[in-house]
Amino acid sequence: VAISSDGTLELAPSLKAIYTSPSTYIWQVVTDAQGNAYVGAGSPARVYRVAPDGKATTIFEAKELQIQAMAIDSDGTIYDATSPDGRVYKLEPNLPATGKKKEKSKEAEATAESSPSEQTYRSSVFFDPKTKYIWDIELDPAGPLYVATGDNGEIYKVEKNGQGSVFFKSDEAHIRSLTLLKPAP
């Protein structure tokens, strides 16, 4: 049951656990058009793909401590930001695997794992701001990715080719969250 603000008792929505992560923390969840959830976790830093039926697969492991922030674009590419020693990784979906393991990119400092019957991902370092923390990322539908960082309080604007520059410099040490305002219709 739930108690409303005026003290009325009513039926509460039912809750059902569909996945329990082996990682200590879950920092971010994004979803794709098919209803899959991508869970960014820490200790260890992993991305789990959780299907609507609750079946989960580890699709990415980073060397850093945690996946702090995530974004997904319309073609299924997932951007994962790590902390500490923050980097933004790009996970690009491959065609369904045929049983052979994909070779990792030389730039990749992580692994992508999947069973032969599931979607696999290519991982690479997309952007390295050379800062301690990445707290949040936002993907602009027009193309650029914005990256909120800590230690120097900067927001980076990163183009689709992975080239980034300081978009905003704050007097604060940390910029912890971002949001993009959508223009009024």
Image (tube, rainbow, N blue to C red):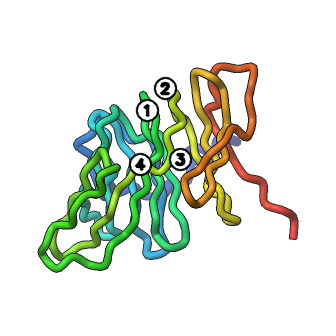
Badge 4 amino acid = Val
Q: Nearer the viewer, residue 68 or 86?
A: 86
**Which of the two labelled residues, at mark 2 and mark 4, occupies the earlier sequence position?**
4
Q: Report the number of discs.
A: 4
- Of labels 4 and 1, earlier in sequence is 1
Marks 1 and 3 sit apart, C-alpha to C-alpha, by 37 Å
Query: Label 4, on which residue?
Result: 125
Give neighbour class at mark 2: few <14, some 14-19, many 20+ (Cα, 10 Å): some
Disc assigned to residue 132:
2
**Residue at 43% from the left image edge and 71% from the top image edge:** 35
Q: For marks 2 and 3, give the CA distance.
A: 42 Å
Q: Nearer the viewer, mark 1 or mark 2?
A: 2
Q: Quadrant of residue 3?
A: top right
C-alpha span from label 4 to label 1: 14 Å
Between the residue at mark 1 and the residue at mark 2, the CA separation in whole angstroms equals: 7 Å
Q: Which residue is mark 1?
A: 83
Would you say the residues marked 1 and 2 are in contact, meaning their CB atoms lie under 8 Å apart? yes
Q: Nearer the viewer, mark 3 or mark 4?
A: 4
Residue, disc 3: 2
Q: Is residue 80 left or right of residue 149?
A: left
**In terms of depth relative to the viewer, which is nearer, 7 or 43?**
43
